[in-house]
Amino acid sequence: MEWLTAPFEVTFVQRALWAGMLVSAICAPAGTWVVLRGMAFLGDAMSHGLLPGVALAALLGGNLMVGAVVSAVVMTAGVTALGRTPRISQDTGIGLLFVGMLSLGVIIVSRSESFAVDLTGFLFGDVLAVRERDLLVLAVALLVALAVSVLGHRAFLALAFDARKATTLGLRPRLAHALLLGLLGLAIVASFHIVGTLLVLGLLIAPPAAALPWARSVRGVMALAALLGALATFGGLLLSWHLSTAAGATVAALAVAFFFLSHALSGLRHRHTTRRDPAPTPAPAPTPASVPAVD
């Protein structure tokens, strides 16, 4: 029992656990829509697109969170604008913005003689360095994410399954898409300094994807995703403490492992159900003698 509780008797590990649980709750709503709409590439592009703002803020001695917010707004506006251009596919526009923003960030970093920007911290985060102020920021971000998710649920749902239906219902799919991008940006900005941009997708995509085979509603996917993210945080911190591994990477790796375990168990359940309840044998085709005569 001490093996389970000893790490969490340390104050900074306790803060890391709370931070990971808050991040999981923030990422669950956005990640669910990302998974349902097949927008994983967009999530990856958004996370890497934060680099220019973060790098510039670090070089100017500003707040990294403010720089990340500015980059997220630029990415959201760019994706929304390019999405309305009929001659450019959405994937092409996202790819161009991804490369452009990442390149700009590297250029900004390379202009620094001392390379003051900690790229390792940006890419991989430092969940064990969470402060009480960071927990407050995450709590506020969670409230905003929940408010946007509740208010935009109907529009997001229609947009995820039939954009034309959303237009027919007067739900303004373009505005809903922009709000969804904002929700995604909020989740990434709130999470990048905890688990890093390269690992944020682990908590953004893996828990909802793992929850998908077991939940019966979109809200169910979100709730189960938040729970799985919290379990990944607890297990990842526990393993990293005893195995002396990187905490953020261990949390993200465990979240991905949950995804593969979930789908493996789902496959076994499907096979068991198929064997227990085999499909009914189709009735044999009627013979000529059994076909009634037609007058």
Image: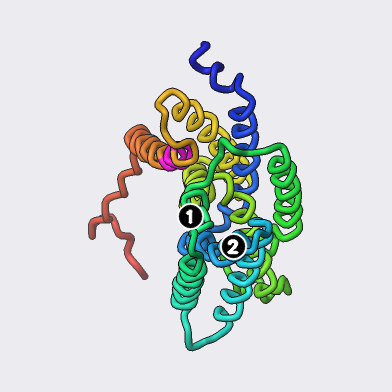
Pick out the residue farthest to the top.
1
Q: Choose mark 2 or mark 1, whichever is in front.
A: 2
Q: What amino acid is at disc 1?
A: Leu
The color scheme shown is: rainbow
Where is residue 154 shown, x and y percent of the image?
70, 60
Q: Is residue 226 above or below residue 85?
A: above
Q: Above or below — where is 214 with respect to 42? A: above
Estimate how packed mark 1 is, as few (under 14), some (14 to 19) or many (20 or more) residues with alpha carbons within 10 Å: some
| Image side of residue 260 versus residue 182, left or right | left
Is residue 254 located in the magenta-colored stretch of the structure?
A: yes
Q: Residues within 10 Å of mark 2 (few under 14, many from 20)?
A: some
User: In percent of the image, x 31 and y 49: which residue is there?
Assistant: 283
N-term-proximal mark, 2 vs 1 = 2
Residue 50 picture location, percent across and down: 56, 63
| Real-space CA distance between mark 2 and mark 1, rounded to the nearest whole angstrom | 12 Å
Quadrant in the picture for the C terminus: bottom left
Q: Residue at x 59, y 55 (%)?
A: 188
Can see residue 262? no
* Whole-percent x, y for residue 33 in the image: 58, 57
User: Would you say 183 lies left or right of 93 here?
Assistant: right
- Residue 6, compared with residue 220, is above or below; it is above
Q: Is residue 75 visible?
A: yes
Residue under pointer 1: 119
**260 lies left or right of 7:** left
Which residue was labeled with disc 2? 59
Q: Which contiguous range is marked in magenta?
A: 250-256
Which of the pair 173/290 is nearer the observer? 173
Q: Is 203 contained in the magenta span?
A: no
